[in-house]
Image: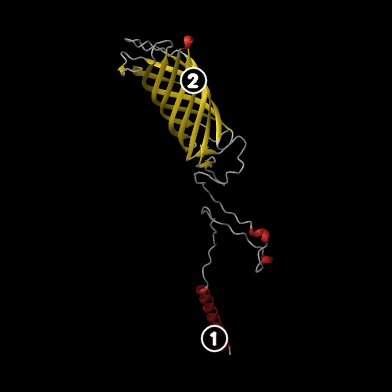
């Protein structure tokens, strides 16, 4: 009886030890889990739902709570748009790819040495003042620049019925410093050819003198009245060298020892733009 009881107790202890060993071998080793933060840029973060709303549609107010960082770049390009659209105060649309007519008038004053007399040809003085007019035809390639041809005509009278008429023709380029503002400073430069007709009065024959307009420059301030019209006060001058002359009925002769003469002018001018389009200021590059 005692022997049987000892054998039963030993068998029970052995079975318990084996079961404990099997359990230790089959249980996985649990390690703590570390949650890494999301550091990727421009990653969209979705809102979380409270446990009591799991399985239900997300409320509309939470749908708009997603956050996303974006960067946008505006392309620099001409903005045509609706030309009837109102512009910000003090800002105007500027003509581009347009045909431009330029008209002007004002006072002209000559200066410099006389053309010396020779034979029957009398000396010709340029130091006279009078009224003048200009006409130009240009291509306004962009709001800031135009190129074209320009001509002028002036009349200077002197005592005793003497008169001096002068005309020019040449090329001209204009740069506009602030074309999208109501007041737009500009500068123009060019060169060409100048001709004069001197009528001394009495029985002396008229003299025709001509030569190169070496340089011409002017500055002004455009005031844009509308998208097609502007007016401006303008001042400028040119320098000339007369190389040839002739008297009525006689052949042309070369002027000996030619001198440099000049003209100053001041007045008003107007621009009339036809065709093309009226460009708005270019947008700036920005972020949002």
Residue topped by disc 2 = 265
Q: Nearer the viewer, mark 1 or mark 2?
A: 2
Neighbourhood count class around disc 1 (C-alpha, 10 Å): few under 14, some 14–19, many 20 upward: few
Q: Is residue 193 left or right of residue 159?
A: left
Q: Which residue is mark 1?
A: 7
Which sits in the foreground, 193 or 287? 193
Residue 282 in sight: no
Secondary element under disc 1, as helix, strand or loop, is helix
Residue at the spot x=67%, y=65% of the render? Answer: 51
Residue 152 vertical placement versus 73 (above, below): above
Is residue 99 among the parts visible in the rendering? Answer: yes
Q: Which mark is residue 97?
A: none
Tell me the SS state at disc 2. strand
In-image side of 164 versus 254 (left or right): right
Which quadrant of the view contains residue 146? Answer: top left
Q: Is residue 190 above or below residue 6?
A: above
- Spatial separation of the CA atoms under disc 1 and disc 2: 136 Å
Q: Locate residue 48, reporting x and y percent.
A: 63, 61
Nearer the observer, 260 or 141: 260
Residue 272 vertical placement versus 104 (above, below): below
Tell how many labels.
2
Mark with earlier residue (1, 2) = 1
- Residue drawn at (36%, 22%) of the image: 212
Q: Residue furthest right?
A: 52
Q: Quadrant of the N terminus?
A: bottom right
Residue at (39% x, 21% y) in the render: 195
x then y, percent, for residue 68: 57, 54
* Identity of the residue furthest to the bottom in this view: 1
Q: Residue 104: x, y in percent?
A: 51, 26
Mark 2 packing: few (<14 Cα in 10 Å), some, or many (20+)?
A: many
């Amino acid at each position: 009886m005692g022997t049987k009881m000892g054998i039963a107790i030993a068998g029970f202890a052995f079975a318990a030890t084996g079961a404990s060993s099997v359990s230790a071998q089959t249980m996985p080793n649990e390690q703590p889990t570390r949650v890494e933060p999301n550091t990727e840029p421009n990653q969209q973060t979705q809102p979380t739902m409270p446990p009591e709303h799991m399985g239900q549609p997300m409320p509309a107010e939470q749908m708009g709570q997603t956050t996303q960082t974006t960067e946008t770049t505006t392309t620099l390009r001409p903005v045509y748009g609706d030309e009837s659209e109102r512009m910000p105060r003090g800002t105007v649309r500027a003509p581009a790819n347009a045909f431009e007519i330029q008209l002007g008038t004002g006072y002209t004053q000559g200066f410099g040495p006389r053309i010396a007399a020779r034979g029957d040809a009398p000396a010709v003085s340029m130091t006279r003042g009078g009224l003048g007019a200009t006409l130009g035809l240009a291509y306004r390639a962009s709001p800031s620049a135009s190129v074209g041809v320009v001509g002028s005509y002036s009349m200077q009278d002197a005592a005793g019925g003497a008169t001096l008429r002068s005309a020019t023709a040449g090329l001209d380029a204009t740069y506009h410093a602030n074309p999208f503002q109501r007041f737009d400073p500009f500068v123009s430069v060019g060169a060409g050819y100048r001709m004069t007709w001197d009528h001394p009065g009495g029985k002396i024959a008229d003299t025709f003198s001509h030569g190169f307009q070496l340089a011409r420059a002017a500055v002004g301030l455009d005031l844009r009245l509308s998208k097609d019209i502007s007016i401006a006060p303008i001042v400028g001058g040119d320098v000339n060298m007369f190389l040839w002359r002739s008297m009525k009925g006689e052949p042309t002769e070369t002027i000996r020892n030619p001198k440099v003469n000049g003209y100053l002018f001041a007045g008003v001018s107007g621009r009339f733009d036809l065709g093309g389009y009226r460009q708005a200021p270019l947008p700036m590059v920005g972020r949002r």
